[in-house]
Amino acid sequence: MLRVIARLVDWLKDPEQQYLEQGILEWLRRRGPSLDSQVPWQAVHNLREAHSMLEDRVREWKAQFWREGLEAGMKKGRKQGLQKGRQEGRQEGSTTEARNILLRQLRRRFGEVPTEIEIRLNSASREQLEDWIDRVYEVETVEAVFD
């Protein structure tokens, strides 16, 4: 609509076409509120004013849509961040739990666990810890669990 009014302003600049401009203004005053109720259509005196008002509204819309988009993006980002944080927390908790189970099994089966093995357990992945947990009762020495 902004482009149409800009072209009408240019097209109807001759004084003999003022009656046509007045007709278009009357149409805008009647139909304008259904197009955008925020524009004071009844206060528009010429097409240049209408064009200027619509330019202002377009800037407002862009700013509003940008803010809404930013808010939606931030909300989505927070949600994804929380989900990722929860997932990482569960994985870390699960790994810690597997490490504690393995350490408990090693102590029950073999007694005191050497420091080197505890260090190795602290850097192991969940999958590796699970493999070692399965091997605790299949071997004869604590070192054989990790071979």
Image (cartoon, rainbow, N blue to C red):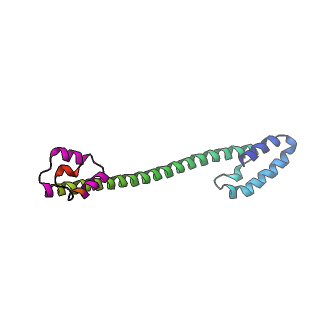
The answer to whether residue 33 is left or right of residue 112 is: right
Labels in figure, total: 0
Is 132 placed above or below 63 here? below
Q: Which of the 4 image quadrants contains residue 13?
A: top right
Is 128 placed above or below 6 here? below
The answer to whether residue 117 is left or right of residue 27 is: left
Q: Which of the 4 image quadrants contains residue 87?
A: bottom left
Q: Which residues are magenta?
A: 107-134
Could you say which is closer to the camera, residue 72 or residue 36? 72
Q: Residue furthest right?
A: 16
Could you say which is closer to the camera, residue 48 or residue 83? 83
Q: Residue at point 86% right, 45% down?
A: 17
Could you say which is closer to the camera, residue 20 or residue 77? 77
The answer to whether residue 137 is left or right of residue 42 is: left
Image coords of residue 37 (percent x, y): 65, 56
Q: Residue at point 36% right, 55% down?
A: 86
Q: Residue at point 55% right, 47% down?
A: 66
Image coords of residue 32 (percent x, y): 71, 55
Characterize the magenta stretch by its predominant secondary structure. helix
Residue 98 in view (yes/no): yes
The answer to whether residue 13 is left or right of residue 35 is: right
Residue 93 in view (yes/no): no
Image coords of residue 144 (percent x, y): 20, 51
Residue 121 colored in magenta in the image: yes
Q: Residue at point 18% right, 57% down?
A: 105
